[in-house]
Image: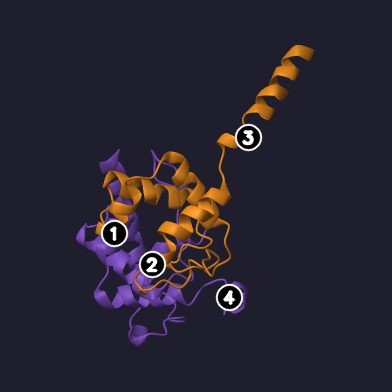
Chain colours: A orange, B purple
């Protein structure tokens, strides 16, 4: 019993880095996304470009995966999403979802 | 599965149509303010914080309150044409006129998180 608890503790301690890295996400977002979606990810250069700040992380990941596979088509976004790794997608989505912005689902 | 969800969403749209006629007009600030705002089709997914959808990839449906009006319009038109692919959104968008699309978009664009909007400005 004591051993199994110990090994659980060891596993937990050994795996933290794999999860997500919002700082890497910030770097990537500022390099790849900010030029069109805005440095604050609220005021993009074109009003048809969506606001990303505060959007759900899992939705952003889904969208990027869809752009990567071509399930969703947009010439610019397909090109940007293509070279991203799974970690890139997770990191950048984690960063964007944590930013303050006007997006809300309290709309009733 | 796909067919099943298509049928389901088609049914949902059919049920939602009459209710849309009574939908509130408040919030439609654009030129389309005279049109009905059929948001009854949207709120069941987009106004429930954290609501998850879309087997087999489960993710939270996006927040659309406070999104820009032109983006929401473009998204709905892409769903209507089939350029963007999501069973329930395609079914919903197919039933909308251009006027209704801009009314819905204006409605949601005006419903951002007010405190955050003020702080950002």
| Residue A16 marker | 3
Vertical relation: A69 (above or below) B81: above
Q: Which residue is mark 2?
A: A36
Tags 3 and 2 both on a single chain = yes
Q: Earlier in the sequence, mark 1 or mark 3?
A: 3
For mark 3, does the 10 Å Cα neighbourhood hold few (<14), some (14 to 19), or many (20 or more) residues? few
CA gap, disc 4 and disc 2: 18 Å
Q: Position of residue A11 (x, y in %)?
A: 66, 24
CA gap, disc 4 and disc 3: 33 Å
Please name the residue shown 28% across and 57% down the image.
B90
Q: Which residue is mark 1?
A: A76
CA gap, disc 4 and disc 1: 27 Å
Please name the residue shown 28% across and 78% down the image.
B99
Decide: marks 2, 1 in contact (CB < 8 A)? yes
For mark 2, does the 10 Å Cα neighbourhood hold few (<14), some (14 to 19), or many (20 or more) residues? some
Q: Which residue is mark 4?
A: B120
For mark 1, does the 10 Å Cα neighbourhood hold few (<14), some (14 to 19), or many (20 or more) residues? few
- Nearest to viewer (mark 4 / mark 3): 3
For mark 4, does the 10 Å Cα neighbourhood hold few (<14), some (14 to 19), or many (20 or more) residues? few
Chain bearing mark 1? A
Q: Secondary structure at mark 4?
A: helix
- A18 left or right of A70 in image: right
Is residue B43 in view?
Answer: yes
- B63 left or right of B99 in image: right
Front residue of this view, candidates A39 and B47: A39
Chain bearing mark 2? A
Q: Earlier in the sequence, mark 3 or mark 2?
A: 3
- Nearest to viewer (mark 4 / mark 2): 2
């Amino acid at each position: 019993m004591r051993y199994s608890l110990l090994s659980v503790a060891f596993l937990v301690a050994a795996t933290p880095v794999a999860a997500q890295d919002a700082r890497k996400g910030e770097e990537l977002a500022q390099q790849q996304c900010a030029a069109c979606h805005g440095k604050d990810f609220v005021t993009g250069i074109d009003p048809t470009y969506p606001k990303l700040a505060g959007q759900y992380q899992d939705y952003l990941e889904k969208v990027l995966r869809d752009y990567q596979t071509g399930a969703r088509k947009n010439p610019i976004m397909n090109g940007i999403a293509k070279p991203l790794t799974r970690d890139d997608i997770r990191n950048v989505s984690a960063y964007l979802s944590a930013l303050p912005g006007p997006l809300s689902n309290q709309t009733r | 599965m796909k067919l099943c969800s298509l049928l389901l969403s088609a049914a949902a749209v059919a049920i939602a149509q009459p209710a849309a006629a009574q939908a509130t007009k408040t919030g439609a600030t654009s030129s389309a303010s005279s049109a009905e705002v059929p948001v009854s089709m949207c709120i069941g997914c987009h106004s429930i914080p954290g609501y998850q959808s879309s087997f087999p990839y489960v993710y939270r449906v996006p927040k659309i309150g406070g999104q820009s009006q032109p983006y929401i319009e473009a998204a709905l038109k892409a769903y209507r044409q089939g350029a963007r692919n999501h069973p329930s959104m395609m079914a919903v968008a197919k039933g909308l006129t251009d006027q209704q699309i801009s009314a819905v978009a204006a409605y949601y664009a005006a419903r951002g998180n007010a405190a955050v909007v003020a702080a950002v400005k």
